[in-house]
């Protein structure tokens, strides 16, 4: 049943990859009317900073403290990416660089080797294809790796896209669409006589990542945080990430390789190296010391990068919830939905989040798994 009429007018607050993908699903694929509000240019936050890995196995198969069904959501997310990519490229002509080459995970010490074994066990239990690799096998697959590597995993479930191209394609599809309007500035949210509203719209989707909690609502001439209407938004915290890229060269890896929090992603003639995870860091500026530490870690994994010139340094901010999984669904305020808090999996989960949120807003069945990511779990955790 469509709760907001068969043609709801939808306001999306936040033009990052989550807001843009939701707008794409709602307007371009399902014909709804959408306005997208952001104070900054679209797609320039975490979506631009990311490396574009779609990594359900490495990011979600064995992470302590995670939502118990995040792995399942990430697998579903990866499964629908090829269709999403095909559709987006067909509509826009933009090559978004989806690579189906399996990613490699390498262990340089015993504790990482143990972690890789745990990931392998979880994948085996879920019947997800993977290969445990000996030192010789992983070095054969990626000769740029250090001879100090002790073991590895090949993960066909873990793919990658060029996230900057994805964002570019989404923006061009949306800008060309007659039912989509981009608004630069804050959304004029109001509360009138206890009713939450945004003039000209039936539904509001808060998709502003870590900034969701600083969205303002006007009531009797005063501005209040949206958190007053949905307290769970206060649970979304900031996790800064710093990254760099170096020039491609003879010693550079040809495949995506990962080890612990470190990843090396060959892209556009350079190698993207990420990333720090820094709670409460909201600065857009990278710091020399952190970047150099990351570069040295990359050199430890791939020694041939030692003299590769640094081309670019940058920083982004991930939005994270206490269980590292997104809030997706309607809030306690009628007509207010949320899709935010995707932490390390924003690119991977954009298409599945868009599909779920479109189903929920348009009154379709979003499936049983979707219900597990509702904001309601925030109250269960504090009850
Ligand atoms: N997806 C990897 C990161 O957030 O650093």
Image (tube, helix red, strand yellow):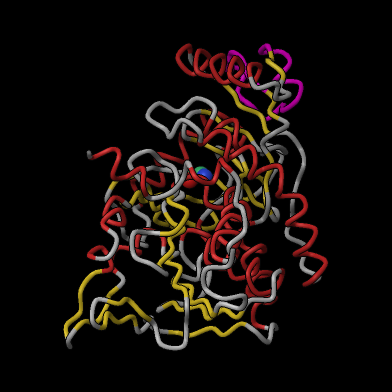
Question: Residue at 52% across / 58% down in the picture?
Answer: 312
Where are the magenta residues, as a range?
134-153
Of 232 and 246, which appears nearest the observer? 232
Residue 18: x and y, percent?
53, 61
Residue 52 colored in magenta in the image: no
The quadrant where residue 333 appears: bottom left
Q: How many marks?
A: 0
The quadrant where residue 66 appears: top left
Vertical position of residue 290 compared to residue 72: above or below: below
Residue 24: x and y, percent?
64, 69
Question: Residue at 55% across / 62% down in the picture?
Answer: 17
Vertical position of residue 312 compared to residue 179: above or below: above
Question: Which quarter shows the N terminus?
Answer: bottom right
Question: Residue at 28% across / 44% down in the picture?
Answer: 379
Of 19 and 149, which appears nearest the observer? 19
Question: Residue at 21% across / 82% down in the picture?
Answer: 219
* Drawn side of residue 319 relative to residue 126, left or right: left
Question: Which quarter shows the C terminus?
Answer: top left
Residue 274 seen in the current view: no
Residue 234: x and y, percent?
26, 55
């Amino acid at each position: 049943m469509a709760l907001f009429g068969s043609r709801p007018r939808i306001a999306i607050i936040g033009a990052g990859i989550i807001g843009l993908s939701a707008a794409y699903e709602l307007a371009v694929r399902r014909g709804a009317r959408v306005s997208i509000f952001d104070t900054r240019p679209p797609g320039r936050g975490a979506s631009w900073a990311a490396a574009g890995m779609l990594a359900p196995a490495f990011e979600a198969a064995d992470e302590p403290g995670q939502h118990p069904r995040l792995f399942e959501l990430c697998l579903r997310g990866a499964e629908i990416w090829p269709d999403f990519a095909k559709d987006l490229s067909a509509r826009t002509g933009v090559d978004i660089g989806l690579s189906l080459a399996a990613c490699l995970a390498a262990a340089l010490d015993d504790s990482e080797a143990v972690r890789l074994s745990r990931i392998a066990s979880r994948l085996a239990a879920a019947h997800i294809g993977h290969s445990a690799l000996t030192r010789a096998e992983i070095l054969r697959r990626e000769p740029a790796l250090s001879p100090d590597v002790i073991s590895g995993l090949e993960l066909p479930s873990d793919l990658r896209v060029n996230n900057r191209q994805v964002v570019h394609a989404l923006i061009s599809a949306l800008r060309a669409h007659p039912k989509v309007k981009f608004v630069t500035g804050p959304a004029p949210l109001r509360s009138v006589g206890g009713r939450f509203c945004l003039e000209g719209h039936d539904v509001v989707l808060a998709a502003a990542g870590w900034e969701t909690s600083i969205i303002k609502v006007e009531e009797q001439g005063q501005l209040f945080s949206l958190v007053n209407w949905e307290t769970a938004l206060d649970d979304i915290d900031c996790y800064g990430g710093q990254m760099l890229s170096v020039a491609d060269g003879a010693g550079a890896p040809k495949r995506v390789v990962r080890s612990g929090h470190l990843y090396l992603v060959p892209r556009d003639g350079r190698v993207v190296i990420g990333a720090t995870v820094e709670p409460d860091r909201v600065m857009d500026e990278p710091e020399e010391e952190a970047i150099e530490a990351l570069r040295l870690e990359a050199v430890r994994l791939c020694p041939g990068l030692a003299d590769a010139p640094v081309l670019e340094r940058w920083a982004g901010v991930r939005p994270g919830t206490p269980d590292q999984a997104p809030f997706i669904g309607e809030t306690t305020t009628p007509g207010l939905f949320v899709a935010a808090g995707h932490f390390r999996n924003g690119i991977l989960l954009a298409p599945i989040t868009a599909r779920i949120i479109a189903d929920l807003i348009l009154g379709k069945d979003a499936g049983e798994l979707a219900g597990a990511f509702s904001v309601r779990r925030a109250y269960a955790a504090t009850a």
